[in-house]
């Protein structure tokens, strides 16, 4: 296994803003910034360390209306907004009184990340990966993917005027093929499942020295993009942390980075230091982190995914153990819901708030409901949930269960007879 | 034909902000605000008249980050933002240097309205229609539609906690059925074409006294929502009008309302009074306005639509003559492009800027290209184009022409052999 890219010669890194080093999340050893993603000592995952200096609310509020307002908290150059990019972020934080009422909650918000340029939170992480990859000297933006990430990488590379190289399983639904192929770039279908594609991507990263696989060899930078979800939630609440947050868990990175963002805001004095609880949401058909949480384990046993929530179907989640840490440290939990509940969660969010989320959103809403019903989530405490993607990309999930109310002839008589008034 | 709703008893109107009266666009006769849409004197279309008082840039900039920052310029109450709504607008204005370069333009922007909650500009007009309908005493939000409008009405009503009633042709693509049905509400498929559905909607509006068909009996209010596109473009350019703008033409309302917005901003002193040129874009398969423009006619002869740009396929566009007026008055033009050019327009926008527009966006990009090539659009002048919807909703248009670069076995050898590096 390649622990670093072939392109170690690209270091020293360019301008990565406040980032100062890479630190192993397991053994804590440090190394200089560069195109590295695994610890040389213990093979643990590397994470970015920073020196933020002083950052004020006013600094942030004066910034662009997208994730780059938080550029001082990300591994990107300070002029990052000047380079063409998809400008993701600052998606709506929607006060969800109808959904709250239907679940018996008092104060609920939906962070609706379907408003991003390619309609999922992946635009955030890809934008940060692209900015860092450019500084690290990479020339091609690449990824293995099953859908959302492929869209985001192909779009971001097109906008930036650089080459993309996207690898997907060849049995991917034709609509996901179209939505990536339309952006141009190199787009390869691979005869195998996602694990096969992922392994091939690692192998290619090991020999194509100027290819940045966003979720492989520049993963430490990429993952930081999810912090912007946490920053935005706090800023949009008026520089305040919610009491409770429910986050979908695929690799687990999004959840751990939201927690990291909250911690950073507290340390910087940008929000009050008060307790918050973080809950993880999985589909029962791919529930390795939930299972470990319930069993009281520290390790996560891989599973073979079988769920309609394909964007969460990572059977061996890299950040699973860190999700367990965050949930336990904050007094939260990790829970899972059936595919039927996922579909009902999608419908509930659509019917109550007019937000059509993808299956991952359905997982989150259904988990929220379960946690409230079980009494593990405080119904009187302010709660935020994440809708990480768009229902337009997972129509198959709801197709069997939604239908028109009636079909009529084009006449007033037919309308009256149908009893629709 | 019913010239007014059955519910004239609902007047006098509630709080409609700066709106003062309804004025006939043909004969100029005025009447009080209310649920009316056609002139009692001449059957001409009614339009909102206002008394804006003084509005400053600072007033607007202090408002919410959505269309309600312009509430002082719309027929809605001043507290409109406090009532649950989908909060559309303030979509990205994207500097499109790659697309500009490929077309030989110097300064080009794309107003990307696919970023709205249900991913088309229809969220704007529906939000205004809903706010006005509530003040006018209506209880149900309704529409005839072939797609985008159905999504927007069903979502907005769900979010507002009121009933929706959406009517569509029964041969609509299943994906458009799903994306409306998921929001709940009354959703009726009608055995007939869009003209049949539209006629039925008018008949129902004539007898269901508390149903607001957004594009029928509250159309004067609804149509004003498109003004927000013009306001946003000016504000996002730094309170400045572009030199040239290219707008897709279906009913023609969007184009005329953008012009109306620019005129209002000039009169209010919010932007400098300088010349701008407005261009309309149609598909050749539904080109009644373009044909009239080219023939030098004032009237628009209806056509039977036959184009892949279904969201623009209105054969008898209500605002067609007004589009001709605007194009001629400003020194613009109306042009049309073939379905092949539409598809190439979609692909060009995606490949150059990472924006996947719907067919209407393809029409606009292709028309822009044609106008530049013909020398009718000044390549050195600042130009804005509208992308009014999302490619995810019109995948069929590009499906035949986009495809992966290669299909390989999951091995490095296969990767190398494919010559992809």
Image (spheres, coloured by chain):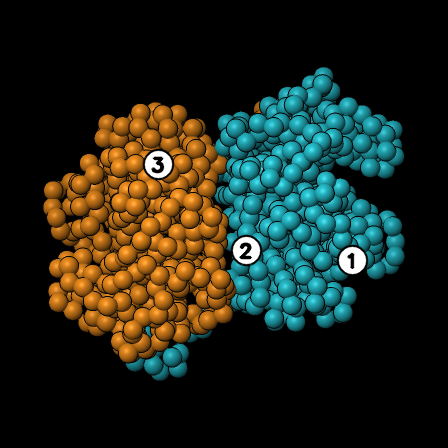
Chain colours: A orange, B cyan
Q: Quadrant of the N terminus of chain B?
A: top right
Q: Which residue is mark 2?
A: B391
Single out the mark in the foreground, 1 or 3. 3
Callout 3 environment at 10 Å: few (<14), some (14 to 19), or many (20+)?
some
For the residue pair B95 and A63, the one nearer the viewer reads as: A63
For the residue pair A36 and A164, the one nearer the viewer reads as: A36
A120 vs A383, left or right, is right
Cα distance between the residues tagged 2 and 3: 37 Å
Cα distance between the residues tagged 1 and 3: 50 Å
Marks 1 and 3 belong to one chain = no
Callout 1 environment at 10 Å: few (<14), some (14 to 19), or many (20+)?
many
The chain ID associated with circle 1 is B
* Circle 1/circle 2 CB separation < 8 Å: no
Q: Which residue is mark 3?
A: A240
B279 vs A180, left or right, is right
Marks 1 and 2 belong to one chain = yes
B40 vs A141, left or right, is right
Question: Looking at this rendering, what residue extends furthest in the front direction?
Answer: A54
* Coordinates of residue B267 in the picture (x, y in percent): 75, 41
Which residue is pictured at 26% across the width and 76% down the height? A8
Cα distance between the residues tagged 1 and 2: 27 Å
Residue B332's disc number? 1
Q: Quadrant of the C terminus of chain B?
A: bottom left
The local secondary structure at tag 1 comes to loop
Quadrant location of residue B340? Answer: bottom right
The local secondary structure at tag 3 comes to loop
* Coordinates of residue B41 in the picture (x, y in percent): 87, 29
Number of marks present in the image shown: 3
């Amino acid at each position: 296994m390649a622990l670093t890219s072939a392109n170690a010669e690209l270091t020293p890194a360019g301008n990565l803003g406040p980032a100062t080093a890479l630190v192993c999340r397991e053994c804590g050893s440090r190394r200089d910034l560069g195109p590295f993603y695994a610890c040389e000592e213990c093979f643990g995952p590397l994470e970015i360390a920073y020196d933020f200096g002083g950052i004020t609310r006013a600094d942030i509020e004066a910034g662009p209306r997208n994730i780059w307002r938080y550029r001082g908290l990300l591994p990107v150059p300070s002029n990052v907004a000047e380079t063409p990019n998809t400008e993701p972020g600052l998606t709506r934080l929607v006060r969800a009184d109808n959904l709250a009422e239907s679940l018996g909650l008092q104060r609920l918000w939906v962070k609706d990340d379907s408003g991003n340029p390619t309609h999922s939170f992946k635009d955030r992480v890809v934008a940060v990966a692209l900015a860092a990859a450019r500084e690290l000297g990479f020339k091609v933006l690449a990824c293995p993917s099953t859908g959302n990430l492929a869209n985001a990488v192909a779009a971001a590379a097109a906008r930036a005027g650089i080459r993309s190289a996207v690898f997907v399983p060849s049995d991917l639904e034709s609509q996901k093929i179209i939505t990536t192929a339309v952006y141009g770039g190199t787009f390869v279908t691979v005869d195998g499942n996602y694990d096969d594609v992922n392994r091939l991507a690692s192998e290619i990263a090991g020999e194509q020295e100027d290819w940045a696989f966003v979720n492989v060899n520049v993963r430490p930078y990429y993952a930081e993009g999810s912090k912007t979800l946490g920053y935005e939630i706090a800023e949009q609440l008026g520089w305040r942390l919610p009491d409770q947050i429910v986050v979908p868990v695929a690799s687990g990175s999004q959840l751990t980075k939201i927690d990291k963002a909250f911690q950073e805001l507290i340390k910087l004095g940008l929000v009050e230091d008060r307790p918050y609880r973080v809950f993880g949401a999985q589909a029962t058909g791919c529930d390795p982190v939930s299972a470990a949480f319930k069993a009281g384990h520290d390790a996560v046993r891989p599973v073979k995914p079988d769920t309609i929530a394909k964007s969460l179907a990572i059977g061996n989640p890299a950040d699973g153990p860190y999700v367990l840490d965050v949930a336990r440290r904050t007094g939260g939990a990790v829970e899972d819901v059936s595919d039927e509940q996922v579909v009902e969660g999608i419908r509930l969010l659509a019917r109550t708030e007019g937000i059509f989320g993808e299956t991952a959103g359905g997982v989150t809403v259904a988990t929220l409901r379960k946690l409230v019903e079980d009494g593990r989530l405080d119904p009187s405490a302010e709660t935020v949930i994440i809708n990480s993607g768009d229902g337009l990309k997972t129509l198959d999930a709801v197709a069997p269960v939604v239908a028109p109310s009636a079909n009529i002839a084009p006449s007033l008589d037919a309308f009256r007879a149908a009893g629709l008034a």
